[in-house]
Image (cartoon, rainbow, N blue to C red):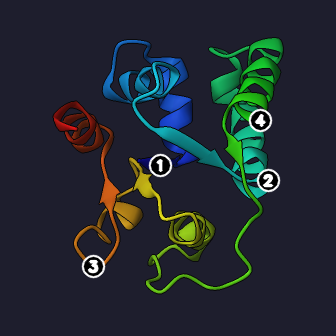
């Protein structure tokens, strides 16, 4: 199984080491699924980790190390040049949907605009739903 984790899941995993997003990331570390990232996803993650409200909790060295670890350890794929078959009401999320589609991967998100796509022909899950799915596998 392959999965694309929305940057909000990746940030949440850093902020709460015991919550569902952290458990999803840990499941990847233990080999439960293959994590797919792309240049746009990593760039968004870097940008978000620089927000002042996050800098208070995640220092610059930790943020850089986290992005570097994901870049080196996950499956790095090019961003899709095709638009997704379904679109989010927030067009800024469409690159994640297109990446998940092009890589035949599940999309895990905490974003309501993305989660509303579940059941519309795309495997879209919350962190808790994805955990339940991989635990059944």
Crowding at mark 4 (Cα within 10 Å: few <14, some 14-19, many 20+): some
Residue topped by disc 3: 120
Find numbered disc 1 in the image and state the secondary structure of the residue it sits on: strand
Q: State the separation of the CA atoms marked 3 and 1.
A: 17 Å
The residue depicted at 64 percent of the width and 26 percent of the height is: 54
Q: Which is more N-terminal, label 4 or label 2?
A: 2
* Frontmost residue, 59 versus 86: 86
Quadrant of the image occupied by residue 42: top right
Q: Which residue is mark 2?
A: 39
Q: Which mark is residue 3?
A: 1
Q: Give the quadrant of the C terminus.
A: top left
- What separation in Å lies between label 2 and label 4 (alpha carbons)? 9 Å
Q: Say which label, 2 or 3, has the lower sequence index.
A: 2
The residue that label 4 is drawn on is 71
Q: Secondary structure at mark 2?
A: helix
Q: Position of residue 128 (x, y in %)?
A: 24, 36
């Amino acid at each position: 199984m392959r999965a694309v984790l929305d940057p909000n899941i990746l940030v949440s995993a850093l902020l709460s080491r015991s919550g569902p997003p952290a458990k999803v990331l840990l499941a990847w570390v233990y080999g439960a699924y293959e994590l797919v990232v792309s240049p746009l996803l990593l760039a968004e993650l870097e940008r978000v980790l620089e927000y002042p409200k996050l800098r208070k909790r995640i220092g610059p060295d930790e943020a850089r190390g986290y992005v570097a670890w994901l870049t080196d350890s996950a499956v790095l794929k090019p961003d899709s040049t095709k638009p997704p078959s379904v679109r989010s009401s927030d067009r800024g999320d469409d690159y994640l949907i297109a990446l998940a589609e092009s890589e035949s991967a599940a999309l895990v998100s905490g974003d309501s605009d993305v989660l509303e796509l579940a059941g519309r022909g795309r495997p879209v899950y919350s962190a808790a739903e994805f955990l339940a799915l991989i635990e059944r596998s």
